[in-house]
Image: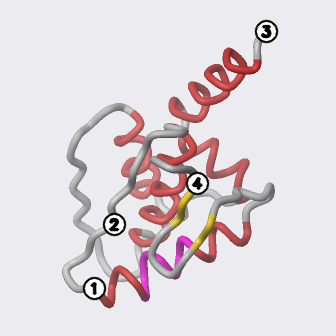
Amino acid sequence: MSAAAELERQTEIIRRDPVSWIAKTFDETPKFPKAEQLITALARGYNRVYCRACFDSSKTWSVARLALWWLYAHPFDSIVVTTAPIWKQVTELIWREIHSAHGRAEVPLGGKLNSTSLTLGPKW
């Protein structure tokens, strides 16, 4: 099997099952069933996923892992945009959690991690 074919095979596995990728990459699982539903909804191709939840219900945890999953499930030409009602939530919640997850990964994820960006390649 060529290197390109093997990369495509591995990427397809990652795309199909983000919960498994999160478990293998970070040795973590969603704390709540709704968090797992949120994560798997994006893998199933839903363009919009709404999550109505209370404080401390794994929303930020899920978003951080989903951002990283999307980048590794769509290598070389993907962009993830993180938003929140106010910039402070983007920097102090979402990106703090992305930094934490990136640093705790079981295998080095690589890339250049800045305060609110992760660059893995020219268009990635």
| Residue under label 1 | 87
| Amino acid on which the number 3 mark rests in the picture | Met
In the rendered image, residue 39, in percent from the top left (x then y), is placed at 43, 49
| Residue under label 3 | 1
In the rendered image, residue 80, in percent from the top left (x then y), is placed at 38, 55
Seen at 56% across and 50% down, the residue is 121
| Residue under label 2 | 82
Of mark 3 and mark 4, the one earlier in the sequence is: 3
| Amino acid on which the number 4 mark rests in the picture | Leu
Q: Which mark is residue 42?
A: none
Q: Is the magenta stretch mostly helix, strand or loop?
A: helix
User: For the residues marked 4 and 1, what is the alpha-carbon distance in whole angstroms?
Assistant: 23 Å
User: For the residues marked 4 and 2, what is the alpha-carbon distance in whole angstroms?
Assistant: 16 Å
In the rendered image, residue 119, in percent from the top left (x then y), is placed at 54, 60
| Amino acid on which the number 1 mark rests in the picture | Trp
Instruction: Say which quarter of the image contains residue 112.
Output: bottom right
Of mark 4 and mark 2, the one earlier in the sequence is: 2
Q: Which of marks 4 and 2 is in front?
A: 4
Q: Give the range drawn in magenta.
A: 92-98
Instruction: Label 1: state its secondary structure.
Output: helix
Residues at badges 4 and 2 in contact (C-beta under 8 Å)? no
Instruction: Label 4: state its secondary structure.
Output: loop
| Residue under label 4 | 120
